[in-house]
Amino acid sequence: MGRLEESDAVEALRREVTRRRFLQLMAGGGAVLATRCAPAATPEPPAAPTATSAPPEPGATATPVPPPPTPTPVPQAEPQVLIYGGGQDIPTLDPRDRGDYSINDMMRGVYDSLWWQEGWPPKLTPSLCTHYEVSDDVQEWVFHLDDRAVFHDGTPLTAEAVEWTLKGILEFQRPRAANLLPVMNEDSIEVVDDHTLRIVLTTPFADLPWLMGYAGAVFVANPDEVMAHEVNGDRGEGWLLENSAGSGPFRIKRWEPGTVYEIEADPDYWRGWPAEGRLAGVIWRIIRDSAERRMALLAGDVDIVDTIPADDLSLIDDNPGTHTEVNAGFLSLYVKMNNQKEPFTDVNFRKFMAHAFDYEGFVATQGGPALCPLLTGCLPDGVPGHDPGVQPVYRQDLEKAQEYLDKTQWAAGGLDLDFVYVTGLPFEEAMGTMLAEPLAQFGITLNLVPKVWPDMVAMSTFPDTGADTIAIADDIGPVATQWMRYQYYSKFWDKPEGGTFQSSCFYKNADFDALLEEAEGTPDEEERLALVKDMQAMVMKEIPAIMVYTIPNMLGLSDRVKGYEYTGYIAPDFWPLRIEEA
C-alpha cells in the first residue's frame, strides 16, 4: 500500500484555527497516516495475495521503526483532579460492544488502542502498535506491538490479548464489529509471537489502520481479568458495564451511572506522562442542560464543558478565567427519516421534507455560516472522496416542496409526526423548529420530543421502534466507505441484532449495497473513490435523511487547563492535560 498522501483539502485545512474563533471551517481535511506508522514506499500494482506467507522481509514494505518513547518522571508539582461537565452518559466499558463520544473518551483513558490519534487533520502515531508491514495487495498485515505494555494488574499486554479482543468484537457482532466484519473474520487473526499479530483480510482493504485506529476503534482488554468476572456465560459483559480491564493511563475510582464517573491516574503508566505534568484524575459530571454546563464553568465548578451552543461563545470568552476552543471536524448533523415507516417510505415525501427545511433560518440561529457550514451532499467536506458537485443539493424551496408533496398520498397534509432530539441541546431543538414551522404550512404537525441519548440509541436499533425523524450527529472519520456503511448499508441494520443510531434512517437499496461492497473490495484508490462518488449521487437522489451541517467542535475551558490539543474528538483526551493555577 502506498503512503496516504496529503490531499489539497488537507493542505487547505492546515490554515490556522485560532483558539477563540473559528476562522476556517472545513475548508478541507483528509487524513494523513503518520510517517512513523505507514508503509514507506508506493508499491507496484497489487500482486497475488500472500495470505499464508511469512511476513515480508524486514525493510521490504516495513514501516520506519520509531525510537520507543521513554517514560517521563512525574513532575514534583502536585497533580490535580479535573472536573468535566458532559451531557452524555457512559453506559459501557466493554471494548467488544459499542462506542460514542463519551464511551470512547473514557475508554481512551482506561484502555490503550493500537494507535494514538494526534493533531488536526488527524494522524495516527504509535501506541500499542509500534510499526506494521503490509503485502502489496493490501490483504495481509503484520502488526508489531510495544513489549513494554502492561495491564493495570501487571500482566503483560501481548498479541494474545489483541487477538482475544478482536475475535470478541467479531463474535459479539455489536456496533464495534461493523468496521471489521466486512474485511475479516475470526480465522483472519493469527498470533505470530507474544508481540506480533498477523491479520489476513477476507478482501483487500487499504485503510485498515484507520478502520481500527480512528477514535481508538479497537481498545485492547485483559482477557484473564474479564473472564474472571464471567457470570452465567456473559463473558464478563455485565461486569464491564461499570468496570474496565485495560492498560491505559487511568483506572476507575468511582462509577455512578447517570450522575458521575471518576477515574484516577496510574502513576506508573507504561507509556509515561508528559514532562510538563499530569492530572491526578478526572471526574465526569453529568450536566444535561447546556446552559447549566456553561454556568458551572463560569462559576468555576467544572474545568471543561462540551457541546456548547454558539450563543455561549462570547459569554465564556468574555469571562475572566475561561475561554473557548472552536475547531473544524467531521461531526455532521442530520435529520434522519425512518425510511421503513410511512410516510417516509415514499421518496417524494422525503424530497418534500428536504425542500421544506429552513436551512438559512437554522444557520442564523447558530451564529452564521462560519459556525454553521451547510453540508453539500451526504459527506462532510473534509472526507477524502467528498464530491462538492454532487446533485441534487437541497435547500428550502416551498414551491418544490409542494410539487413533491402533491405526488404522495398525503398531499392534503393531516399528518402528526415526531422529531426526537437530545434533551438539553438547543441547536438540535432549533433544528426541529426549523422543520416544524414550514411543515405546519402544509397541514403537517411535527412534535418536538426531547430524550436522553441512551434512550435515543436504544430506539434506533430497529425500524419498528425507530423515531419518525431524529436528530443524529455522526463522526465516522476519514474513510468515505465507512460513512456509507454505517449510514446507508442495509445489511448494517437489517439483521437480528439490529443497527445503531448511525443507521437510523433504515435506508434499503440493493443497488447501493452492491456498490458499497464493490468499493470496499477495490484496492485501487482512484477506482474506489469513483465508486464513492456514484454512491453519493445515489444517496442524494433518494435523500434518506436531511443533510444539515458540519458541527464545529466547541469546548469551554478554564484557563487553568493546560496541554489541550485538538485531535478531532468532541471530548478531549485526558492523558496530555494538566491543571496549573494562575
Image (cartoon, rainbow, N blue to C red):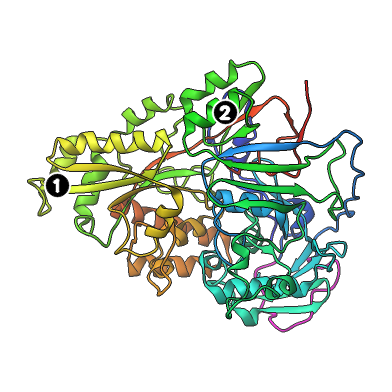
522 lies left or right of 56: left
User: Is residue 206 shown above or below 214?
Assistant: below
566 lies left or right of 346: right
User: Is residue 118 shown above or below 97?
Assistant: above
| Residue 565 visible to the viewer | no
The verdict on residue 581 being magenta is no
The verdict on residue 48 being magenta is yes
Can you tell which mark lies on residue 296? 2
Q: Position of residue 74 (x, y in %)?
A: 89, 42
Viewer-closest of 576 and 264 = 264
Separation (CA) of disc 2 from disc 1: 46 Å
Q: Amino acid at mark 1?
A: Leu
Give the residue pinned by disc 1: 405
User: Is residue 568 shown above or below 137?
Assistant: above
Q: Secondary structure at mark 2?
A: helix
Q: State which tag comes first along the sequence, 2 or 1.
A: 2
Q: Amino acid at mark 2?
A: Ala
